[in-house]
Image (cartoon, rainbow, N blue to C red):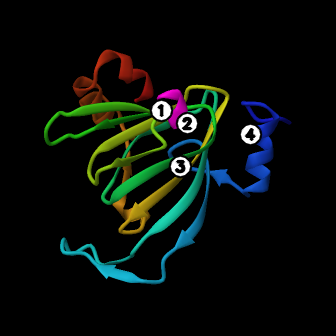
Amino acid sequence: MSAPGGSRAEELRELLQLSPHPEGGWFRETFRSGALVQLQDGRGPRSAMTVIDFLLVRGEVSVWHVVRSDECWIASEGGPLVLRMFNPATGEREECRLGCAARDQQPSRVVPAGWWQSAAPAGDYSLVQCVVSPGFDFSDFRMIRDDASLRELSALLPESWRQFV
């Protein structure tokens, strides 16, 4: 059975050995630094940096989630990826299109630690790499999971972004 997004997306899933990600899409961790850093907030030691390959195909969404580390999204292949970011402390909101700089898209974008984020492909598929530093740990990751959190976040977002909640 072919994945949404056509044969190239299916080929990438197999070639890169991607698995379903809890937030949506497909991923595989490709690097975890052996260097550990001690965090000042007491969360305990973390790898200095992690990297994943992350694939979203048409119809898939990376649901609203927050990471307690900075995350750099880097466009790799496919159509543009629409990345939405929201700072709950200030109400600041940003939207960018990751992709080819020659097409007025950003090749990379950093989502600061503690900002809510969501992404969706603007074409058939988008392959990106996500670099997290200090390294990703699932205990530092939170997704919208319940109706109360969903309503709370939805009230803060513009109408056009609510489809991604």
Check whether the beta carbons of the residues at disc 2 and disc 1 lie within 8 A of each other.
yes
The numbered dot on residue 9 is 4
Kindly indicate the quadrant of the structure image that contains residue 44. Answer: bottom left
User: Residues at badges 3 and 2 in contact (C-beta under 8 Å)?
Assistant: no
Please check the rendered image and state whether residue 13 is part of the magenta-colored stretch, yes or no.
no
SS at mark 4?
helix
Q: Name the residue under label 2.
A: 100
Q: Looking at the picture, does residue 66 appear above or below residue 7?
A: below
The Cα atoms of the two marked residues, 3 and 2, are separated by 27 Å
Q: Which circle, 3 or 2, is nearer the viewer?
A: 2
Q: Which of marks 3 and 4 is in front?
A: 4
Sequence-wise first label, 1 or 3: 3
The x and y percentages for residue 26 are 63, 48
Q: Earlier in the sequence, mark 3 or mark 4?
A: 4
- The residue shown at (50%, 45%) is 23
Residue 46 lies, with reference to residue 25, above or below; the image says below
Q: Quadrant of the N terminus?
A: top right
User: Main structural element of the magenta stretch: helix, strand or loop?
Assistant: helix
* Disc 3 residue crowd, few under 14, some 14–19, many 20+, Cα 10 Å: few
Question: Is tag 2's residue or tag 1's residue first in the polypeptide sequence?
Answer: 2
Distance in Å between CA atoms under marks 1 and 4: 21 Å
Query: Could you tell me the amino acid type at mark 4?
Result: Ala
- The x and y percentages for residue 25 are 59, 42
Query: Which amino acid, by three-letter code, is at mark 1?
Result: Gln
How crowded pointer 1 is (Cα within 10 Å; few <14, some 14-19, many 20+) is rated as some
Q: Residue 22 carries which label?
A: 3
Which region is colored magenta? 100-104
Task: List the residue tagged with mark 1.
Answer: 105
Q: Do the residues labelled 1 and 4 touch (CB within 8 Å)?
A: no
The answer to whether residue 79 is left or right of residue 69 is right
Q: In which quarter of the image is residue 11?
A: top right
